[in-house]
Amino acid sequence: MENNFFLIQDIVNSYYTQNNVYIDHLKISNDFMAMLKKDFNDEEFIDLLICTGYIPDLYPSDSSQETLYSKLIEVLVCEWAQRIGLKSKFVKQKSSYEDVTIFLDNNAIVCDAKSFRLGRSQKAPNVKDFLKLEDIRKWLSRYDKKLGGLVTYPCRHEWSTSSDAYQYCTTKDAPTLMLPYKYLAFLLKYKNKYSITDLKSLWDYKRLFPSTLTKNIPGGNKVGYWNVINNEIKRITHVSQNEFNQFFNYAENLITKCIQANLEILTEKKNKIIENITTQVNSVNDINVLKKEIIQYKIASETDYLNSLISRIYTFRIDEAT
């Protein structure tokens, strides 16, 4: 699986190393989906899905590379839905539309497929970047038959105890399910143990969440949300607690390996910069004190951003997961 940690990144990079004047996102997306169907069996796709959604930290913010990368994550979600037996399509027009439309027994589910950087400045995304219920309501209004919304996002981008996100995602007028990609992988792993129609109950918020989970409930609303969702998923899929735990332990181990692989790339880039600076300065015939000062200055100025990324990833994705 390690060979596929950077599959999507490699695909994106391939188009930006060919001096392409025009990047056809739709063609690339269709080609990517065809490749997934041809080259990935369900087990391989599950592993790919578990570790998905991490925008490369070295991409410039709001760059075209970032846009294409995020689009291919949407394709993954679309392919996931089809593999578990649902109809789905990724949406071509982006303005005021969901990323992926999924149909369960002809009922629409509007999906916002999220991608985030590992080295973002906070552990979890800003709620405004994560979910806007008014968007979910607007998207759902286009369909006569609908179940609700779905927000998918990369693992370890989570709030510690409480968040407006759990409150928004237990609101009954626009029931919106939030699931990290490892949960999508779980539903694919056990797709033969449940009826696809039974997934409707995940949007039965009158039963699941009789009361909206506000931020001030004892113990925080994170625990309350996941207790309900986990129990419902176990009920639907007919898996034991042991099967449930085994899968998510496997997923967490794989995610850790993926994050560490990302850290290795950043660390290697940092070390190459240090090596190049040292070589350049040492080639100058000057006094040793000046050499050392120049080396220290250039190392600090050219690796500070990478040090910050590495530190944040350790803090938010490794240390707090143990």
Image (cartoon, rainbow, N blue to C red):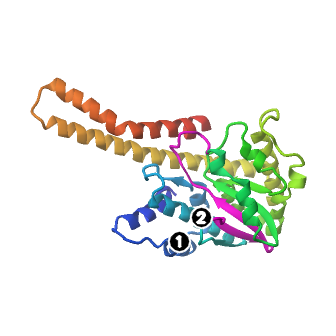
The residue shown at (82%, 68%) is: 197
Q: The residue tagged with tag 2: helix, strand or loop? A: helix
Q: Residue at x 82, y 50 (%)?
A: 231
Measured as percent of width and height from the top left, residue 118 is found at 52, 46
Which element type, helix, strand or loop, lies under badge 1? helix
Tell me the amino acid under the disc marked 2: Glu
Q: Is residue 191 visible?
A: no
Queried whether the magenta region covers residue 165, the answer comes back as no
Q: What residue would you read off at disc 1?
A: 29
> Would residue 19 be found to the left or right of residue 95 on screen?
left
Viewer-closest of 182 and 32: 32
Q: Residues within 10 Å of mark 1 (few under 14, many from 20)?
A: many
Residue 98: give x, y in percent of width and height: 66, 65
Q: Residue at x 51, y 53 (%)?
A: 55
Disc 1 residue type? Ser
Q: Residue at x 60, y 52 (%)?
A: 154
Q: Start and end of the magenta stretch?
A: 96-125
Q: Quadrant of residue 303?
A: top left
**Eyeballing the image, is 310 above or below 144?**
above
Between residues 13 and 137, which one lies in front from this camera angle? Answer: 137
Identify the mark at residue 74; answer none if there is no mark: 2
Residue 250 image position (x, y, % from top left): 63, 50
Mark 1 vs 2: CB contact within 8 A: yes
| Left or right of 182 in this view: 195 | right
